[in-house]
Image: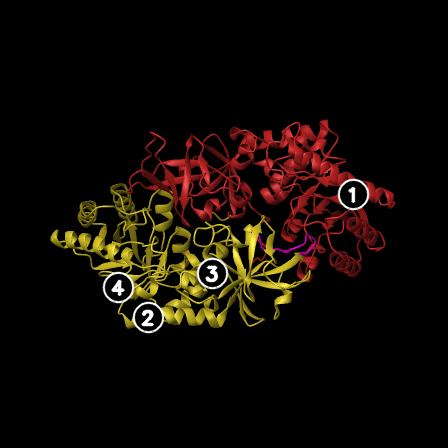
Chain colours: A yellow, B red
Amino acid sequence: MTSLAEIETPAPLVDLDRLAANIDRAAAYATAHHISLRPHVKTHKSPIVASQQLDRGAVGLTCATAREVEVMAGVTDDLLFAYPPIGAPRLHHLLSVPEHVRLTVSLDSVAAIDALADAAARARRSVRVYVEIDVGMHRVGVTSAEHAVALARRVSRRKELEYAGLAFYAGHIREPVGDQDPSLARLNADLQVILDALTAAGLAPEAVSGGSTPTLWRSHELSGVTEIRPGTYVFNDRTTAELGACALSDCALTVLATVVSTAVPGQVVVDAGVKALGREPLRAIDGDGYGVVADHPDVVVARMSEEHGILDLRNTSWRPSVGELVRIIPNHVCIVVHLNDLVYGVRGDRVETTWPVEARGRHRPS
Amino acid sequence: MTSLAEIETPAPLVDLDRLAANIDRAAAYATAHHISLRPHVKTHKSPIVASQQLDRGAVGLTCATAREVEVMAGVTDDLLFAYPPIGAPRLHHLLSVPEHVRLTVSLDSVAAIDALADAAARARRSVRVYVEIDVGMHRVGVTSAEHAVALARRVSRRKELEYAGLAFYAGHIREPVGDQDPSLARLNADLQVILDALTAAGLAPEAVSGGSTPTLWRSHELSGVTEIRPGTYVFNDRTTAELGACALSDCALTVLATVVSTAVPGQVVVDAGVKALGREPLRAIDGDGYGVVADHPDVVVARMSEEHGILDLRNTSWRPSVGELVRIIPNHVCIVVHLNDLVYGVRGDRVETTWPVEARGRHRPS
């Protein structure tokens, strides 16, 4: 297959040149600032893409599911499971990773520490632990320095576990970070309180793991951060561009779609709906659409059904015909990849390669 | 495997008793009203579930993707492709269905008719056609009687095609249908205009295919409808219950999730986020959450990240612990199934069987 017209749509395309540029840009930034880059694989779920990240600057990988750990153990021996290791089936799956893999787990509860230590003992292996702290997103992570110290102490007393540092995720900082950004200053102040408390308790963290794609280029301004875990940067998406962390022309992944109906005036229907794009609003606001047409940035996917995307043509003179191919930049690329089994690697309109989304899913038919 | 505690979460569970009751209830309704039941497989994407529908009253199946057609040809010889057959790869995939399958396609454009007829000629087969009309949803379908007549005439003049009737989807009628419902009356008036025009042109439709799960139980009140294509009814979901077309206790599919963090006060975090539930708002309104806890209907999934669901505990005295299993009724079950490769069939807390979501996806790694 060499042309886009041969692909059954909808289908995810990755521009290989943009992908390479995105990987190199983040690696160069991390190198310049002496920060370890440990990309989150949730965005691509592919050992082929992960290998490119590892070959060009990444120190290891970050995962959120046991399936991701299982698959990525094939391409690195240094994995961070940045998710609470809760539940016997998840722990069993996680600790089935080959022994040569250095496994680090972030967690935020006594229950997680005890279950992980017990499972590590049964598996006769050692697991490194980051204590997860909440720096304002209010999702996971302990909310006080006292709690962080207590968990770090508990970890350091379990012989199967190695206390390795702190982890946080500043997913609440979504705005383009300005010089006088109050949320960044608050985050740094909160981080410093916890770092001081741990140091006073003799538990100064060796690693401080943070970062996200929106804050990627200001990671060096985060207090004491030694490691970052951006995921989205590898492909980028409309949201990342809207937040100012990339240009729209840095978006490597587009969804190839076909115009399937022009019967209703004022709009056309493409075959990329919720089951191809996800229903992810831009900046948490509905009404801005669910993706933008790459060659027509004034046209958005205004409404969707499962297999239908409605392109609103009221603000454009463009009038695509039934059968025309369009490429849509999705709002949230991580969701799009998760909806697919196969990705097409392209340069321009030429298909060069395909790769499976090998680490998607959890439960595979046997 | 026999207990829920052995399943790695998040995972979709289907209550087998509720599934059987849902299948039988719709079949009994269709039989009582002499309407053909042609369930849409988009909801389950499983030939195992489809076989149960066919064994208990369905006359055939409805599909929206060529992959669904390919898979469902294994369990029935009567398939409706209720999606515009646009694009050479889709047409090729579609017409690769075995010859013993009677294939009907709904469409709304001259381009679709000509491409389908040409592809059918190349494949040396005959394809039945429904002309799709828009009855108010403004998605696909021609918007005037004149246009419907013109398409029906064009279909009837192509020897590879057989004009078989009309199709519509009243997805805009979402409210519980009342006796004096104005949208139903308007729909019937619009339908009648088109039926009259077709009859006057000597193109009276043999079949009129409509219906949806929200309007399922009032299908017999739709003008001239001979066939219905509900999908969601097989599992039902929170939206269907909210619309009054089922009870919450008729929802057969729940997402099994584990409480993974209780670190942030006022909430707990479960491992079912966007990648397990989808981000489908209830009744198109955000703020009602993305699913409800089956045993605690006052607790909803209030916020989500990709792998995190935040249960808001402010309106409940329930305080689940880290590691506790919960079952979540999703807002939109068709999206949940599409996110999974495997479904667990349960009775109560006992796992009886599993089945693959065989028709999900489009592009499979070879």
- Real-space Cα separation, disc 2 to disc 1, in angstroms: 63 Å
- Real-space Cα separation, disc 3 to disc 2, in angstroms: 22 Å
Q: Dot 2, crowdedness within 10 Å: few (<14), some or many (≥20)?
A: some
| A243 and B298: which is toward the camera | A243
With respect to residue B223, does A272 lie above or below? below
Residue A222, image quadrant: bottom left
- Viewer can see residue A164: no
The three-letter amino acid code for the residue at tag 3 is Arg
| B310 and B140: which is toward the camera | B140
With respect to residue B172, does A236 lie above or below? below
Mark 2 falls on what kind of element?
A: helix
Residue beneath label 1, please?
Answer: B194
- Real-space Cα separation, disc 3 to disc 1, in angstroms: 42 Å
Q: Whole-percent x and y of residue B152?
A: 81, 50
Q: Are marks 4 and 2 on the same chain?
A: yes
Pointer 3 or 4: first along the chain: 4
What chain does badge 2 belong to? A
Residue beneath label 2, please?
Answer: A29
Q: How many marks?
A: 4
What chain does badge 4 belong to? A
The three-letter amino acid code for the residue at tag 1 is Ile
- Real-space Cα separation, disc 3 to disc 4, in angstroms: 25 Å
Q: Whole-percent x and y of residue A307?
A: 60, 51
Q: Quadrant of the N terminus of chain A?
A: bottom right
- On whether residue A262 falls in the magenta region, the answer is yes
The three-letter amino acid code for the residue at tag 4 is Glu
